[in-house]
Amino acid sequence: MNTLKMIYGLGVVFSILSGFFIRLEHVVFPWHKIPSWEAILGVLGSLLLLVLVKVVGIIVNREEPFYD
Amino acid sequence: MIEPIPPAFFFLFGAVLIPLLKGKIKQGYLLLIPALALIDLLLLKPGTHWVYPFLSYVLVFAQVDRLSIIMGLIFVIIGFLALLYALQVREDGQHVAAFLYVGSSLGVVFAGDFFSLFIFWEIMALTSVLLIWYQREKQSLDAGFRYILMHAFGGACLLAGIVIHYSTQGTLAVGPLGSGLAYMLVLTGFGLNTAFIPLHTWLPDAYPEGTVTGSVFLSVYTTKTGVYVLARCFPGAEGVAIMGGAMAVYGVTFALLQNDVRRLLSYHIVSQVGYMVAGVGIGTELGINGGIGHLFNNILYKALLFMCMGSVIFSTGKRKFTELGGLARKMPITTLTCVIAALSISGAPGFNGFISKGMVISAATEQHNSLLELMLVLASVGTFLSFVKLCYFTFFAKNEAMEAREVPFPMQLAMVLTAFLCVFIGVYPQSLYRLLPFAPVVYHAYAPYHVLGVVQLFLLAGLVFILAKKQFTPHLGIALDFDYFYRLGGRLLLWFCDAALNAGRLGWQERCGRVVKAAVHFSRDPLWLTETAARYVEVRFHQGFALGSKHEIDALRWELKEVLKKRGEAYDENFYRRPIGIGVLLALVFFFILGLIYLKV
């Protein structure tokens, strides 16, 4: 399990470092210039969705059976 | 030379023979029909076929172009695979419903005029609901009724839009619509089938309640025909593109809240259809190609996901994440194919979703639509998280008590073949590019930046999942959606009909009843009625104008009471009837004699 975690961690580090060398040729938006932008988006997007799900969950989650 | 016929006819007329066949012959027949339809499709050449004059209209059953051919191909291919998956189903009705559903969807795809499109559209709604009702549970029946009510509303909007469009434009040809009321009504009708927010509620409500095999068909046809007609009639509509982005994010957010495996998949239909709608709304060649390409790929992996979760339900009888887990060793084929489908829908490199999702996002970028690009990428992150959750809590989470075994061979074969197609298109995207509406396709799916970007996105999102796994743990309960308001509206309508309208009706009925009763009461003795009225007026008159002493007024009152007691005593009905009867008799005798004299003369 620890080996798997280590491989995963190495994969994360390697992919982020690769982002400094592999860049988008046709930049359209300013954030396309940021190295490893997708990695940042992966973290921020996940956290944003997690918060969104928690907030929406407070409003919409109900015990079953609710409609009966 | 064999002349091709509209592909829809194979399924629509082929359904008739299903109840007459038995055993292996029936199973062979179920697979033969889609195979014949596929050959027919390959023979179809772009152009218009099967034009049929009806009243003063011209119906077109086979309007063939690159767009309808790619749609027809994927509909027939997945029809074959879904029927293979459903081969063990013994209920003929389910097969007949599935055939009619597939046939009517093909009818919509190849319809060249709005009239025949509408007819097939309605057959599609009516036959698809049977695949929900065949589950024969209370929830299925209820969800089916809500489904059909929503689709009846959508159908009514569509019909009204078509009528207005025809009366203003004078044409029924399926194509881009002008602006105005017809535009809005047709868009609402199409949007309902495409699961536009907030008209999407029928989808996550009904699809999880379908039969194990029926939900595979349901996941394919209704929403995709919606996307197809949007591509025909509303390409490049900016509002449609924004709706697509909103659907993509909304779908994943609600998917993450679900505890029911097939409800999670249903919300992902909303999300994935969002990508297609966005592509169509962008309207550029890359956008339309991306949207339709994503439709093609989505049909494969979404049907596969429904097959896998159907297999889990078939094998374990359980459908909640909180009850599942530990199936990876017990159902290896289902697990492997589900992981392939999960990677495909997430858009991992090497799988078909990677190709088309990238095309749609690139189309948004090319159009300088920053908001849409970010929404679609965010939805990508959510999709990945959702399917990590689905695979983990269904197959890999510890659950020693779970008992299950792999599903029958035809179901496994269908899953393996569908998974193969997902990988094949992912590895060899040219096979898809060749079919897309706008050729040649200028898009490099495996550009290094693109591949690295997706890898980074998934690795980091996966890291968040590992670190915050507890936050993604499913919980018991349900998540309310916009249908809460529709149900509330329904209850208000019911209350209005019952408490207001029905109570009013009962009140009036009672009042009218009293009048009739009084009329009947008095008509039994009309003489007494006039006498009573005269006495009553006399008493009131004397009282009102103080005429006479108290003693005299009391005497008048006593007389009135005496008259009231006498009802029916002095009145003999026959006494008044008799003269009338005699008069009529004399008249008849007179006319009889007159007749005799007349005849003699």
Image (tube, coloured by chain):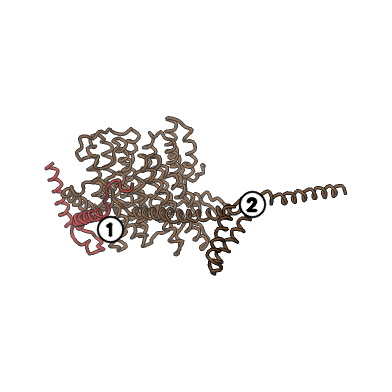
Q: In this view, does B548 lie to the left or right of B570?
A: left
Dots 1 and 2: beta carbons under 8 Å?
A: no
Q: Which residue is depicted at the point 73% across and 51% down?
A: B579
Which residue is outermost to the bottom?
A: B545
* Residue type at the position of mark 2: Ala
Residue B60 drawn at (x, y percent):
51, 51
Please report, as a chain letter, where disc 1 is located. B
Q: Which residue is drawn at 57% across and 55% down?
A: B562
Image point (26%, 39%), residue name? B336
The secondary element bearing badge 1 is classed as helix
Q: Is residue B567 above or below residue B311?
A: below
The dot on residue B375 is 1
- Residue nearest the viewer, comparing B447 with B124: B124
> Mark on residue B561?
none
The chain coloured red is A
To which residue does mark 2 refer? Answer: B570
Q: Which of marks 1 and 2 is in front?
A: 2
Residue B172 point in image, percent of width and height: 51, 57
Q: Is residue B576 above or below residue B1?
A: below
Q: Give the residue type at disc 1.
A: Met
If you read the primary sequence from the N terminus, does the residue marked by circle 1 or circle 2 appear first? 1
Badge 2 marks a residue whose secondary structure is: loop
Left or right of B489, for residue B518: right
Relative to residue B368, is residue B250 depicted above or below? above
